[in-house]
Image (spheres, helix red, strand yellow):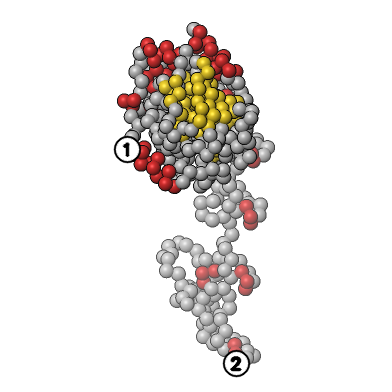
Amino acid sequence: MCFGSKESREAGDAPARPVPLSQTANGVSNDNKRSSYNNAPPSKPLQHQAQQRDIYAPPPGPPPSHSARPVASSSDDYAPPPGPPPGQASRPAATSSNDDYAPPPGPPPSYGGSVGAGPSSTNGAGDYAPPPGPPPGKSEQPQQKVHDWETAVPDNSLLPPPPNLFAGWDRSPANNATEDEAEQGKAWCYQHPINTAMNVQNNAATYEAIKHFNFNLQVPSTYQGKFDRKSFGVWAGETKKRSADSCIVSFPPLYAANLHSPAPGGQPFTAYYEVHIARDNRKEVSLAMGFVAMPYPHFRLPGWHRGSLAVHGDDGHRYVNDTWGGKELIDDNYRLKPGGKYGIGMTFTRKDGAGYGPAPDTIDVEVFFTDNGRIVASWDLHEEIDAEQDLPVTGLEGDYDLSAAIGTFDVVKFDVHLNPENWAYQEMKNKKLVEMRS
């Protein structure tokens, strides 16, 4: 370790500390001569009583570089020099060691004019408070209105219940046709597809017949029993025991696409009729009532094949192009009963938005069923369906004529009312009578 300094010293500079002079041979000191070292050790130890371990003891006094320091204890050999570090001379004297690097007094330069900032602030919450007034560009903006979502969103309690997607029955719990009969019906429909060419023309004769409910009911060859016309739009029927399946259809149709479609003018139209079951009918009502697009197999009940829908009285199910067991109309216990007055209707309404195709894209269809003048069930024809259970509703969407269809099997006694005079559903009755007299 070298104790000399590599920095040059000017001739006039005083030494950093007193330098001991070397002694002459006669003991007189020589003031004009210095040692080549600032503090050279004596040539021989002066203490003869020192022990052997002190032979190489350090020379007395501090190292040369500490010549200006006051005499201190051994623990202060490397203590920092007194006074502040260079560049800090202008700082006020610190009161303690913890204040050596304290921030300068006062707020930062950028916060000198901020409200709640600086030494006058009583708490820290205002150090970063936003400036007063609205943000730039917002001073002249009008107050925004609160969105009234309750008016825009309808009350869900007024909406119909969601459809039961998995309510289809594989078989009817009452009566079922044979598989061979079902296959024959499918083959007949394949050979006789529905076609808009069968729609009646919009002429005066057709219009007058429909307006005055002058409908005829066509009885198929499979029908076994009595079927008589009582008055305009009123027919009475009675079948024999173990009669085959039969489908009676109306002509003209109750819904004529060329006359009643709401797509051009936007006026909704409802096709509706009723069937009254005789009071002396047996407990099981072997009858189906609905609508079909022509042609339709006369030896099959309505609702079983394409372009048809119906409610069956023996099991209380609704069928829409369904050759299996249908879906419950209300619940598992609902059935048509002797003495009951039942009606079925289809309401065709133009959609709010413009369509981009034929009638299925422009018309909404609602089907409803009445029991003694009261609506007990309704469903949207285009309801969400199960792709594995349900077949298309082609033919029922307003682009084809739809005839009233009454299906019979086994023994049943009934009246068909196409004329509203004896309808139990007063709302439809009054509406139809007003239309007829206007």
The image's mark for residue 52 is 2
Marks 1 and 2 close (CB-CB < 8 Å): no
Q: Which of 241 and 297 is in front in this view?
A: 241
Counting the numbered discs, the total is: 2
Q: Mark 1 points at which residue?
A: 191
Disc 2 marks a residue whose amino acid type is Gln
Residue 13 falls left or right of residue 356:
right
Q: Which of 51 and 93 is in front in this view?
A: 93
Residue 104 falls left or right of residue 224:
right
- Within 10 Å of disc 1 (Cα), the crowding (few <14, some 14-19, many 20+) is few
**Alpha-carbon distance for marks 1 and 2?**
134 Å
State the residue at coordinates (40%, 13%): 207
State the residue at coordinates (45%, 61%): 12
The picture quadrant where one finds residue 316 is top right
State the residue at coordinates (56%, 43%): 174
State the residue at coordinates (53%, 83%): 42
Q: Give how far across and how far down residue 168 sits, in percent.
A: 52, 43
**In this rendering, the label closer to the viewer, 1 or 2:** 1
Q: Residue furthest right?
A: 122
Q: Which of marks 1 and 2 is nearer the N terminus?
A: 2
Q: Give how far across and how far down residue 412 sits, in percent.
A: 56, 32
Q: Element type at marker 1? A: helix
Residue 308, can we see it? no
Q: Element type at marker 2? A: helix
Vertical relation: 231 (above or below) 402? above
Q: Give how far across and how far down residue 128 sits, in percent.
A: 58, 38
Q: Give how far across and how far down residue 38 sits, in percent.
A: 49, 73
- Within 10 Å of disc 2 (Cα), the crowding (few <14, some 14-19, many 20+) is few
Q: Nearer the viewer, residue 80 or 387?
A: 387
